[in-house]
Image (cartoon, rainbow, N blue to C red):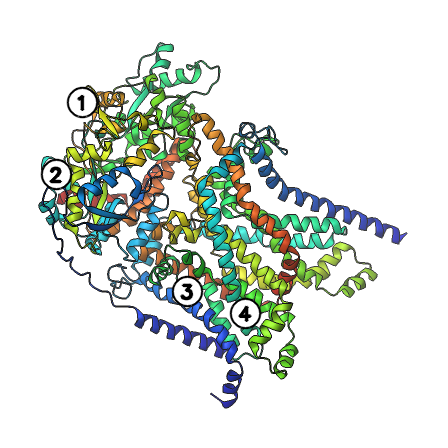
Amino acid sequence: MARRSFTTDDQVFNSVVNVFSIITILIVLYPLVFVLSASFSDPDLVLKGEVLLLPKGITLEPYRMVLQNEKIWLGYRNTIVYTLLGTAINLVMTIMLAYPLSRKDMPFRRAITLFVVFTMYFNGGMIPTYLLVRDIGIYDSIWAIILPVAITTYNFIIAKTFFENSIPHEMYESAMIDGSSNIRTLISIVLPVSSSIIAVLILFYSVSHWNSYFSALIYLRDETLFPLQIVLRDILLLGQTEQMGTNEVGMGDKIKMAEGIKYSVIVVSSLPVLILYPFVQKHFVKGVMIGAVKG
Amino acid sequence: MKRSVLVVFMLVALLFSLSAAGNKEAVAPAAPAKSVLGLNATGFPIVTQPVSLTVFGARDQNQAEWKNVRMLQEYEKRSNVQMVYQEVPSQGYDEKKSLLFASNDLPDVFVRAQLSKVEIAKYGMESGQLIPLNDLLAKYAPNFMAIMAKYPTIKASITSADGNIYALPELDLSNTGRMGFKQWINKEWLAKLQLKAPTTTDELVTVLRAFRDNDPNGNGLKDEIPLGIREASSIYVLGGAFGLQNQMKDTINIVDGKIHFWLKDDKFKSYLQFLNQLYEEKLLWKDYYKRDLPSWRSNLSNALFGAFYMPYSDVFLKVENQFTGYTPIVGPYGDQLWSDANSGVLAVGAFAISNICKNPEVAMRWVDYFYSEEGSLFFRYGIEGETYKLNEQGNPVFMDSILKDPKGFMTALGQINLVPGGGFPQVITNDTDGVVASALTKEVSAMMVPYLPEKVYLQPSFTQEESEQYVAIVQDMYKYRDEAVTKFILGEWDFNKWDEYRATLDKIGLPKLEKLYQQAFDRL
Amino acid sequence: MSKRTLKRIYGKLDLFLLLLIPLAWYVVFKYIPMYGLQIAFRRFNPSLGIAASPWAGMRYFNQFFDSYYFWEIIYNTISLSIYQLVIGFPIPIVLALLINEIQSKHLKKTIQNITYIPHFLSVVVVVSMLNLFSNVDYGIFNRFFGLFGAPAVDYMAKAQYFQTLFVSSTVWQSMGFNSIIYIAALTAIDSTLYEAATIDGCSRFQKILHISLPGLLPTILILFIMRMGSLMEIGFEKVLLMQNPINMSSSEIISTFIYKNGIQKGQFSYSAAVGFFNSIINFGLLVISNSLVKKFTKTSLW
C-alpha cells in the first residue's frame, strides 16, 4: 500500500517536472522560431501581425536584399578574419598562461595568479586604454580589435582549474623522471588529453569575437574594417535601412521592406555561430564541467 | 597569502614607477614653420608647388567617400592643394572626435568638424590644439573678412572669450536660411473641408480637429495625422505664438540686453498645456518623441500630415504641390512671432586648423574660397555644363542625370559635393540655396520673414572656467528639461507638478546658468 | 633568496619563458592603463599629456556627487544589478535542478540543447528582437498580453518596463548556459546519498532540498562572490543599445554615463573620476561579500 502511493507520488512529480520542462522549452524557443518564420514571410503580413508561428506568404525577397548588401558581406568577411585569427591568439596565450600557473610546483604561482586576477576587478577604464592603443600604433587596424582582448581572465581561470583538476601531479613527476622538459610535457602529454577545455576556449572566445561591436566602434575609423555587428547595429537599431538599395520602391513599401529585412538580417548574422555550436557541443559541456567547478 | 599580496603590490608599484618614467614629457607644440614655397596671395592655384594636408571630419551617410567627391577632386586640381581625407562616418563621429583630441593625434585641418562652443573653448583656448585664426583671416581670407565686416553679429558670435577665433562657421545668409522650420499646411484638405488656414491657436485646433474627423484625403481610413512635429527637440516650434523666443538656439528671450530663460514662465506652462491638449485629442503625431525618422519620412511623402513644420520641401517634393505656407498664428496673449530664427550661423565649428599644421596659410586660402559667391556656387552646384546649367532666369539648375538619379537625388548629390547633411564651411546665399530650397520653399519663407524677431543672437562665448560650469549645469538641466517637457505633453505628469518642476530647475542651477550667460553676453 | 628557491626556479625556467608573453600582455594592456587613472585628479589637457596636466584634486568627484542625477544614476545602477542578481542568479540553479530531475533522456537532452541557443546571439540581435517584439502595432509582446486584455504599449519606450525587459531578456539568453556549471556539480554528488535517502523514505522533493541543494552550495557561493564583485558592471553594451530618450530615467547607469560624458562629449577627467568611483565600489563589494561568505561558510575566493 505504502509502496503504491510512493510510486504515484513519483509519477506526479515526474509529470510536474516534464510540464515545467516543456514550458521552458517553449519560452526559449518561441521567439527564435518567430524570427525565423518572420524572415521568410511577406513583410506586409508580419506587420499586420498575422504571422504567429509559421511563415505566411513565403518570400525570399528580404533575403535577396540582405545578400545584395555589400556592407553585410564586407562585415561578414572582417568578422570571420577577426574571429579566426583572434581565437587562435586567444587560445595560445591562454594556455601559455594557464598551464604554468596550474602546476602546483610552480614558484610564485599564487602571486602571479593574483597579479592576473586583480585586473578583473580593477582597470584603467576606456580612455587610458584608448590612449594606449593609439600609442602602441595599432589604432585603426585589425590588431586593435584582436590584441586588447588577447586574454580573458575569466577563461584563464577556467583553463587553469581544468589543468589542475584533470592532470594528476604524478604525471608531471613521471614526465620529469623521463627527462622531458616542461614544455614537451605540455605538448605531448597535457594537450592531447585537454581537447574538451580547448573546445570550451574556442567556443567562448569565438562567440565573443563574433558578437563584439564595441571595440570596433572606438578603435576603428576605416569603414572597410568594420565587423558585422557594427553593420548590424546600423541596420537593426539605427534604422539605416535606406542604404539597402530600396530607393526604387515607394516610401511606404520601403518602411515595410526595412522591417521585413530586419528579421532576415538577424537570421543571416546568427546562423554561423549556431551552426558551429553542435560540433563543439559534446566537448564543451565536459570542459565547462571540469573547468568551472572548483575543487 | 599575505606574502603573495605583498608581491603583487610591489609589482604594481614597480610598474607604476616604470610607466611614469617611460612617459615622455609633453613636447611643447612647435611653432608652425613658415615653409610654403610659391603661395599665391590671390587666385588659383593657391600654391604653385603641390601641398598636401590631412583632413578629419564627419561624412554624412549620403556622401560618397570624400576622395571620390567630384567637386573636391576638381578643387584639388584648381588649387594644387592635395587633401588626404581621413573622414569618418557621422555615426560614431562624436566618439572618434573626442578620442582624437584626447590622444593628441591631430590632422592638419578639420572640415565638417561639428565642433561645439564648449569644444572650441576646450581645444582652442585651453589645450591649444586648435590655433587662433585671426591673423590668418586678416591676411588670407578676404571673402570671410568681407562677410564679417557686413555682419558684425557673426563676428561676435564666433569669437571666443579670449578674443580669438578658433573655428570657422557654416553661414546661411539667404532668406530661406533666416529661419529653421517653416510652417506648412495641406491646402487640398483645407479646400475640401472649406476651411481657411488658421490665424490663431484656437483656429488651429479647430482645423486640426476637422482634419482628424472628416477623412480629408478621402481614402476611407482614419490615417490622417493632423499635426506633425518631427522630434522632441522641435517641440518649441510654435512657442512664438506664446511669446517664447528661441534666442541663442535655446529657451531664451532677450529683452533690453537681459537674458531670460523662460522655462519657468507661466506662458511656457500654458504653451505646454496647449500641446498637451493637442496630444490628448490625438491631434499631435503620437510618435513625435521617439526619433522615428523613417516613419516621419514615410508619413511626409505619403502626405498624411495635415499641418507640419519642415525647413525645406526637398523630402516631400513629390507631394509639394498639395501644401502651402501660412503666416504665424496669434496666440492667447496676442503674440505673433516666428521663433525658430537663425542668426546666419548654421554650424559654429565647421572648420579649424590644428597646431601641427605646417601650412596654415594654405589651409586658410583653401577654405576662404567657399565664403565667396563664386565659391558658394562651385561648392553647392559644381561645374557648369557638367553638373548644372543656368535656366532662362539665370538660376543654376542641376542636370537631369542628378535630379532624376535612380538612387535618389540626395545620394547623387553626395557624389558631386558635400551638401547632404550640411555643416561644411561655406556661405549659402539667395543665389545658391536652391540646391535644397524649391521655389515654393522660398515663397513660404518670404511669407514668414516679417514675423521673425528683430535681432537674433547666437550663444555667447564662455571662458574656460565658465565653460566647465556651463557644462556641469546643462548636462543635467537639458536632460531634466527634455524629460519633464515630454512627460507634461504626453500627460504622464499632471500640471500640479509644475511647482516641483520649477523648483527642480532652480536646484539644478538655472539661475546660475542665466548669470553665466549674462556675464558672457555683457562682454560682447 | 634561498638556494632551494633558486633551484626551484631554475627547474621551471621554461615555464617562466611561457609566462613571459602573457604576463607582458597583462602589464601592457591592463596595468599601464591604470596609470592613466590619475587624470581623474587632474585637469586633463591632451597637449600637455597625462603627467603634465595640472592637478584638480577632488573637483571632478565633487562635480559628480553634486550632480542632480547622481542619486538617480546610483539608484538605477544598483537596483538594476540587484534585480538582475535576484532573478538572474537563482534561475539557472532552478533550471539545473529541474533538468537533473528529468527522467526521459530524450527530453533532458532537448531542453539542454535548446536553452543554450540564445547564449550565442549577439546583444545587437537580442536588443533588436526586443525592439521588434515591443512594437505597438505588431510586436508579439503586445499580441500576447493583448490576449489578456492588456492595452498595447511600446515597452521599449516606457521607463518603468526597462529593467524588467533587460533582466528577463538576459535571463532568457543566459539561463541555459549558466546552468551548465550547476548541472556539472549535481552529477558530481555521490549517488549513494540519494540511495540512502530513498531507503529512508524521502520524497523526491525532500531529496532536492536535503541533498542536491547542499551539494550545490559551494559552487553557488563561489559564483555568488564573483558575481558580487562585478555587481556594478551590468551588461554595459546591452544597456547602451536599449537606451532611448524616453526610458533614460531608468536606463542611465554609471557605465553608460561615463561613456557619454567621456567618449562622446570629451570630458575625460570627469568621466575618469566617475569610473574610479565605480571601481572602488566594485572592489569594496567584492571584499565585503567575500568576507561575509567566509564568515558563514569556509569558502573563499582567495
| Same chain letter for marks 2 and 4 | no
What's the CA distance linking mark 1 and mark 3? Answer: 63 Å
Looking at the picture, which amino acid does disc 4 mark? Ala
Crowding around mark 1 (Cα neighbors within 10 Å: few <14, some 14 to 19, many 20+) is few
Q: Which badge, 2 or 1, comes first in the chain's sequence?
A: 2
| Same chain letter for marks 1 and 3 | no
The disc at residue B394 is 1
Give me the chain letter of mark 4.
A
Above or below — where is A173 with respect to B399? below
Which quarter of the picture shows residue B413? top left
Counting every numbered tag in the picture gives 4
Q: What residue is shown with label 4?
A: A98
| Same chain letter for marks 4 and 3 | no
Looking at the picture, which amino acid does disc 1 mark? Gly
Comparing B515 with C188, the one in front is C188
Q: Identify the element where label 3 is drawn.
A: helix
Comparing C279 with B40, the one in front is B40
Res. B228 in view: yes
What's the CA distance linking mark 2 and mark 3? Answer: 50 Å
The disc at residue C29 is 3
